[in-house]
Every structure is written in C-alpha cells, then in structure tokens.
Amino acid sequence: MAAPRILYNTDITINFDRGLSVYDLTQRQVSSINDNPFTGARQRLIFFSQYDLGIRCGYASADLRNQLLALWNYIKTGNTLSFWHDPDLKGVWTYEGKSLNDNEGNAPTTATGTMSYQTGKYGLGLSITNQTVYYAASTYFATAPTKGTIAFWFAPAFVVSSNSSNHTLFQLDGASGLGVMAAYWTSINTIVWGVNNSAGGTPFTIGGSVSTLLQNEFHHYAFTWDSTIANGGKYYLDGVLVQTSSNSSFTIRNIATNFRVGYDATDYANGTFDDLLIRSDVLSDFEITQLARTSLWNRRNYFASLMTDDMQFNASPIAGTPNFDIEMNFKEVV
C-alpha cells in the first residue's frame, strides 16, 4: 500500500510511513480517568510514552473520520507514523538508513563519488571528502525564500589548528551561476555565511571564529534569515547566538538550480554532517537551542515518531453535529 497522508485543519500532518521501529524503548504505561463531556461516562485513557505523550483528535470532521477508517488497516499492522505540526518543515536528513533521500523521499538530482556513512552525532552521519551532493533547490525553497532556517551537526575531518583550506558547508545556487546564499569554514578558521539580494551585492555576511574546535568533534550550526526585516540574519553555534546581521530589508535573489551540501564546485567540506534540517520559517533562539540538545525525529522527540499502541479505534458521533470525537492511542518509537 502506498504511504498515505492526511492533513487536518492545514496545521497537523500525519504520515503513516515514517519512523523507525528498530530502536528499543523502555516504556511506561500511563493512564488517566476522564469524564466524557458528551456522555458523562467515566473513561480510562491509556497510552505508552517516555514523555507522557498522548494524542487526541477531538471534534474531527466526518471527512477526517472516513480517511482514518480507510487508513486503519495500514497502521494496525504495526507500521509506524511520524507527526509534525506545521508545513514549514521542508527537509530532514538523519542518514540512519545510509540514504541521501530526505524524510519525504526526495533524492538528490546529482550525487557523484562513493558516499561514506561514518559515525555521526547520533547514529550515522554523511561524510563528504571528495563527493558531490546536489538537490533541486525548488524542492526545499520558494522561488524567493524570504525566510528560512538551515541547521545541522558537522565535524571537521581536518586538523583545525593546521587548516589552510576553505571548506564549503552548503551553497544555494541562483540563476546564471549567481549564488543565493552560502556558508563556509574558511582557511583562517572562521565560519562565514552570506546572503545575496536580487539587485546584486551581498546584503549581509556574518559568522564567527571556530579556531578552537577540534578534529572529528561535532558541533551544531544553525542559520536563520528573514529578508523582509532589518537585521534579519542570525548565526548560531551549539545553540548560542554568535552574530546578528546588520542590514536593511531586501529582496532575496531568486533561485534556479541547486542546493549543494558540502561542496560549491571548488571546495569540499571534508567532514561529516548529521541531522540536516531545512525549514521555511525562522526558528526562535529557544528552538535553535533545543535543536542543539537533541537529535531530530525519528531518533528523538523534536518531531515525535509514534506507533499505534493497540488496535482500538474510538469514533464517537457528537450529538447535533456532523462531527466525530476520535481517540487513538500511540506509543513513541525512538
């Protein structure tokens, strides 16, 4: 059966083919007694979770109920699902399956060289020493990506103290070879991240020193931008804000071609990436801090990975309405 999806009220997406079931989790049973607001009856809600996680989809429309019923045979066979709360999540790569595909199954348009999956920050990571990985930029970025977040873990394979080369972390290509944005580890051991505008020129370049970091040591890097406001660019290292841009609002340069990971047609990253994330919104300081403290779904609960806890499916009609109160129990899969 093809991987089904339902979209509920445009802000909750449930995918029924996501998650990894191979990780063990010591669960504890959680139960609560509530009064049903419609019948007055006492009811026991039971679910399993490391974080006391319970999901209840109340006041669901009849259309949603029909979709869930149609999908029930899929999830009750033990398939896992993942749950996230907004459509701004564009791309996630955890590299656990030794795959360059993102969480939606999007594959790179160009990948040359033998990919090496080394020990990452969490599980496996992608090592880029002399390989190239390009994705279709339009898959992850709007024509003019006015806002966004790019974040990942990276460990240099080179000795930082004796480094004399530039290393590309990522580059977003524009029309006619004109870059939209790029981040580099420079030959003088600084991170430099720049964003270009449609009128030409660079509205901001920011970064900071990484000279004290060590070979094969993972650190978390995050870059956020909002071109519609002044001073809208931020660079974070290990969840801490390092620098904010100084610029006026601008129109970001349009995109035409590639999103490159670890290569810009000249310089390779020469290091290992893990938990690469692309979003079309600006994460807050707190959210960046959380990214730097835990791995992405499906190995941790930033975007929870869930599996049905039992075969029960309660869909009680709400009197006087065309809606149903739907209750489904899940357990977390790490």
Image (cartoon, grey):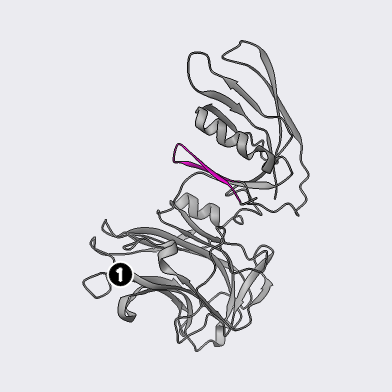
Residue 253 visible at all: yes
Which is the main secondary structure of the residues drawn in magenta? Answer: strand
- The percent coordinates of residue 331 (x first, y second) are 70, 40
Rendered residue at 55%/88% (across/down): 162
Question: Looking at the picture, does residue 169 appear above or below residue 326?
Answer: below
User: Neighbour class for label 1 at 10 Å: few (<14), some, many (≥20)?
Assistant: some
Magenta-colored stretch includes residue 90: no
Rendered residue at 62%/34% (across/down): 69
Toward the viewer: 22 or 301?
A: 22
Toward the viewer: 159 or 166?
A: 166
Q: Determine the image quadrant of residue 140.
A: bottom left
Q: How many marks?
A: 1
Magenta-colored stretch includes residue 8: yes
Which region is colored magenta? 3-15
Question: Looking at the picture, does residue 45 appear above or below residue 77?
Answer: above
Rendered residue at 66%/52% (across/down): 19
Q: Which residue is mark 1?
A: 204
Q: Determine the image quadrant of residue 271.
A: bottom right
Toward the viewer: 29 or 107?
A: 107
Residue 307 visible at all: no
- The percent coordinates of residue 181 (x first, y second) are 37, 71
- In the image, taking residue 7 as reference, residue 281 lies left or right, namely left
- The percent coordinates of residue 327 (x first, y second) are 62, 28
Question: Looking at the picture, does residue 194 appear above or below residue 290?
Answer: below
